[in-house]
């Protein structure tokens, strides 16, 4: 199984990029992982929020295959503890999916067709974080989940 983090817009903060890369490198020892970045839309001031969501949705769907398991990182999703998230990831691994894609939407969230395509929703916090920070938080939590599943001492209870 491969885990993909599909995001709209790139990370521009060099400190966040460096930390993301550190956790991505650590993940290589546990599971195939890839980050796919869809470029942000240009000239968004001239289109409505709904149109922006629809255009982003089309770009997101172009990167999703019919048999992919799709999980949205969404404020209305299920919240987990780190141990609970590791159990969630473990179930996805045991379900024999070829690819599990976690999706971070654009600044206004997802169009309805993305919610319809999704197999689930996960919230990383009740708080709101920048889209750039969410990428780092997700990669760190995925790394933490892998160490929990392997019984390694990174996570402390």
Image (cartoon, rainbow, N blue to C red):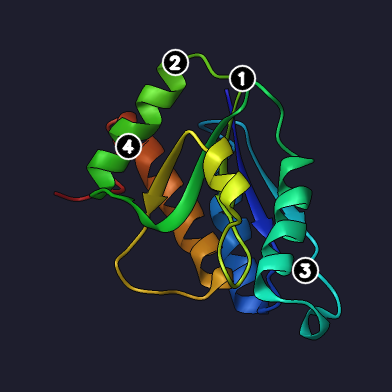
Regarding mark 3 in the picture, which secondary structure is present there? Answer: loop
Instruction: State the image coordinates of residue 84 (x, y, percent, origin top left).
Output: 24, 40
Q: Are marks 1 and 3 in contact (CB under 8 Å)?
A: no
Q: CA distance from mark 2 to mark 1?
A: 9 Å
Regarding mark 4 in the picture, which secondary structure is present there? Answer: helix
**Which residue lies at the image location 36% right of the left edge and 41% below the top edge?**
145
Q: Please rate how many residues cluster around mark 2, counting C-alpha atoms within 10 Å: few if below 14, some from 14 to 19, many from 20.
A: few
- The label shown at residue 40 is 3
Direction from residue 81 to residue 58 in the image, left or right: right
Residue placed furthest toward the left: 157
Q: Is label 4 or label 1 in front?
A: 1
Instruction: State the image coordinates of residue 102 (x, y, percent, origin top left).
Output: 54, 44
**Image quadrant occupied by the N terminus:** top right
Q: CA distance from mark 2 to mark 3?
A: 33 Å
Say which of 82 and 131 sits in front.
131
Residue under pointer 1: 98
Q: Is label 2 or label 3 in front?
A: 3
Q: CA distance from mark 1 to mark 3?
A: 27 Å
Does 144 sit above or below residue 12? Answer: above
- The label shown at residue 86 is 4
Residue placed furthest toward the bottom: 45
Say which of 102 and 142 sits in front.
102
**Which residue lies at the image location 80% right of the left edge and 63% below the top edge?**
39
Q: CA distance from mark 3 to mark 4?
A: 31 Å
Q: Are marks 2 and 1 in contact (CB under 8 Å)?
A: no
Does 136 sit above or below residue 61? Answer: below
Does 45 sit above or below residue 29? Answer: below
Instruction: State the image coordinates of residue 155 (x, y, percent, origin top left).
Output: 26, 48
Q: CA distance from mark 4 to mark 2?
A: 14 Å
- The label shown at residue 95 is 2
């Amino acid at each position: 199984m491969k885990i993909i983090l599909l995001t709209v817009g790139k990370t521009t903060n060099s400190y966040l990029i460096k930390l993301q890369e550190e956790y991505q490198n650590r993940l290589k020892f546990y599971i195939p992982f890839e980050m796919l970045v869809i470029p942000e839309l240009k000239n968004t001031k001239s289109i409505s929020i709904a149109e922006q969501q629809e255009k982003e949705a089309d770009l997101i769907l172009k990167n999703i295959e019919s048999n992919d398991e799709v999980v949205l990182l969404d404020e209305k999703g299920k919240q987990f503890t780190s141990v609970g998230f590791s159990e969630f990831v473990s179930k996805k691994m045991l379900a024999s999916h070829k690819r599990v894609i976690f999706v971070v939407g654009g600044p206004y969230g997802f169009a309805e067709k993305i919610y319809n395509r999704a197999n689930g929703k996960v919230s990383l916090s009740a708080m709101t974080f920048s889209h750039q920070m969410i990428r780092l938080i997700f990669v760190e939590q995925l790394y933490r989940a892998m160490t929990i599943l392997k019984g390694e001492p990174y996570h402390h209870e």
